[in-house]
Image: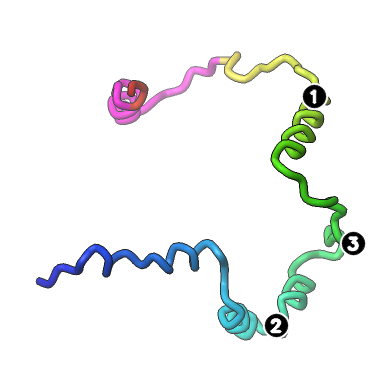
Amino acid sequence: MQRDDITTLEDADAFSARHIGTTPREQAEMLTLLGYDSRAALIDAIVPPAIREQAPIPLGGPLDEAAALAKLKSIAAANRVMKSFIGQGYYGTHTPGVILRNILENPAWYTA
């Protein structure tokens, strides 16, 4: 049995390709398979007109980090603190033993 070198097994280009998206050739193949001439034709066929955005979203210009944080803080300041009911109710449920033993009673899950 032949063992490959780690550099052979690492395909560094695969990571970026996975996260950048499809190539124009791949998009053309997919559109041909689906029977559409363009992405716009595909979108027209699958997105109902009633929910389709007709005009571009007015996003404004880019902001630097400090300006973006200031804007987010001003938006967050408009929030009102309300009473939280999360976790305030208990409902009798059955927790399977495998969950109790392997997760809830295992200190590796809740200690450093």
Query: Based on the displayed image, in which of its 4 quarters is residue 76 positioned?
Result: top right
Binning the other alpha carbons within 10 Å of mark 2 as few (below 14), some (14 to 19) or many (20 upward) gives some
Question: Measured from the top left, where is residue 22 in percent x and y?
Answer: 57, 72
Disc 2 target residue: 36
Segment tinted magenta in the rendering: 90-108
Identify the colour scheme used.
rainbow
Q: Which residue is mark 1?
A: 77
- Residue 24 in percent (x, y) is at 61, 79
Q: Quadrant of the C terminus?
A: top left
**Vertical placement of 51 versus 35: above or below?**
above
The amino acid at mark 2 is Tyr
Q: Is residue 1 left or right of residue 109?
A: left
Residue at (20% x, 66% y) in the render: 5
Front-most of 76 and 54?
A: 76
x, y (%) of residue 20? 56, 65
Q: Earlier in the sequence, mark 1 or mark 2?
A: 2
> What residue did someone put label 3 on?
55
